[in-house]
Image (spheres, rainbow, N blue to C red):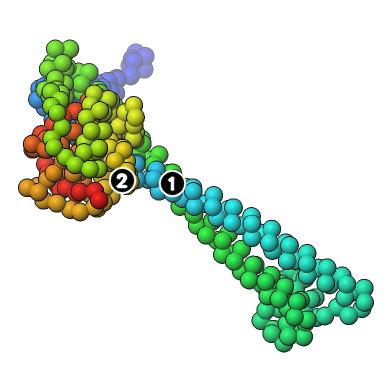
């Protein structure tokens, strides 16, 4: 009878139960942890959301300035590359013309049976070798010798130009890659800021945006003269236009795009980025500020505005906020410059 009893399954059942219990506890803990992480930002107060959004948008503006710098380098590299390619094409044409002329001499000498060793060298696959053998050049006629020397010089210069073009092409590709990277960073930071704002109620969001982006009344420009007056006038005309990262107007601006456009209207060419504009012109202290001066903020020189007098400036604050008036004291002051 004992042989017909069912085998005991206690150990298997208890082991399975323990494993199941452990998995259940682990899963519950993981779910709790993930749930807490996923909803952590939902528990932020409106003030904390504002601080975080400001941080994201400041980081986006820093990336915008890096993007502007990379794009400016790419544009310069592209223009230089185009010029070098044109130069290489012209030099190739001149080189071919010289070789054809030399070929005509060689043909004439061949027909007469008197082709010179120098011409044989010059028409070889490495024409430059003959330049290292002056004795051969001296045995050629003066005109042939001049053509041989010309071909050698043109060969060397053409190789130099092609080398410069290759270097510039590499720089262009690197700048374009950097610009693309900074563009992705800007988009990621702005998307993160938008996700935070979307967690607020409509009323909270409206109050927060009103507190951050409220535009002050546009008073008459402070007294200014000459080019500075024209730059300030341009900035006043831009009030209310949207912040558009990477833009220099006339329909939208980022911070350095606005200051560049304002001074361009006054006949002064400023560089493109905040960290290059601060070195454009004369550096001035805060107590020396005059209308038209460029005022810079944050330790990384990532923001700029146009001073208009009375402790105020006009600037393009950040995405979502139009060009507006603000107090210079609203942000951590980093320096000022007076364009010449």
Q: Judge whether 15 appears above or below 62 on screen.
A: above
Residue for point 22% across, 30% down: 236
Q: Kindly state the secondary structure of the residue where label 1 is placed.
A: helix
Question: Would you say 130 lies left or right of 158 here?
Answer: right
Q: Kindly state the secondary structure of the residue where label 2 is placed.
A: loop
Is residue 64 shown to the viewer in this render? no
Residue for point 67% across, 79% down: 131
x and y percent of residue 173 in the render?
47, 47
- The image's mark for residue 74 is 1
Q: Judge whether 226 appears above or below 102 on screen.
A: above
Q: Splitting the image into 4 quarters, where does residue 136 fall? A: bottom right
Residue neighbourhood size for the residue with mark 1, other residues' Cα within 10 Å, grouped as few (<14), some (14–19), many (≥20): many
Q: Judge whether 86 appears above or below 154 on screen.
A: above
x and y percent of residue 174 in the render?
44, 49
| Residue on which disc 2 sits | 268
Question: Would you say 180 lies left or right of 311 here?
Answer: right
> Which of 165 and 281 lies nearest the eye of the viewer?
281
- The image's mark for residue 89 is none
> Which of 131 and 57 lies nearest the eye of the viewer?
131
């Amino acid at each position: 009878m004992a042989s017909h009893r069912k085998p005991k399954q206690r150990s298997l059942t208890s082991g399975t139960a323990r494993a199941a219990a452990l998995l259940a506890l682990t899963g519950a803990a993981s779910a709790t942890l993930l749930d807490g992480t996923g909803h952590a930002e939902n528990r932020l107060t409106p003030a904390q959301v504002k601080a975080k959004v400001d941080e994201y948008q400041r980081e986006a503006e820093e990336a915008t300035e890096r993007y502007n710098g990379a794009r400016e380098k790419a544009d310069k590299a592209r223009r230089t590359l185009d010029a070098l390619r044109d130069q290489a094409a012209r030099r190739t044409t001149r080189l071919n013309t010289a070789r054809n002329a030399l070929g005509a001499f060689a043909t004439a000498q061949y027909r007469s049976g008197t082709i010179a060793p120098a011409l044989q060298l010059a028409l070889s696959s490495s024409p430059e070798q003959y330049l290292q053998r002056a004795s051969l050049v001296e045995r050629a006629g003066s005109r042939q010798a001049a053509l041989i020397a010309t071909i050698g010089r043109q060969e060397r210069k053409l190789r130099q130009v092609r080398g410069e073009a290759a270097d510039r092409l590499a720089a262009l590709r690197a700048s374009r890659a950097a610009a693309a990277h900074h563009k992705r960073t800007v988009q990621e930071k702005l998307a993160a800021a938008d996700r935070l704002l979307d967690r607020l109620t409509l009323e909270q969001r409206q109050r927060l945006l009103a507190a951050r982006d409220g535009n002050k009344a546009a008073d008459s420009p402070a007294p200014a003269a000459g080019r500075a007056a024209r730059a300030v006038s341009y900035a006043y005309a831009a009030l209310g236009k949207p912040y558009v990262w990477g833009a220099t107007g006339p329909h939208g601006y980022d911070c350095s795009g606005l200051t560049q456009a304002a001074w361009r209207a006054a006949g002064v060419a400023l560089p493109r980025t905040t960290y290059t504009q601060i070195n454009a012109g004369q550096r001035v202290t805060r107590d020396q500020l005059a209308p038209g001066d460029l005022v810079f903020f944050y330790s990384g020189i990532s923001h700029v505005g146009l001073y208009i007098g009375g402790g105020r400036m006009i600037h393009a604050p950040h995405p979502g906020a139009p060009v507006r008036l603000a107090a210079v004291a609203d942000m951590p002051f980093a320096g000022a410059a007076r364009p010449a």
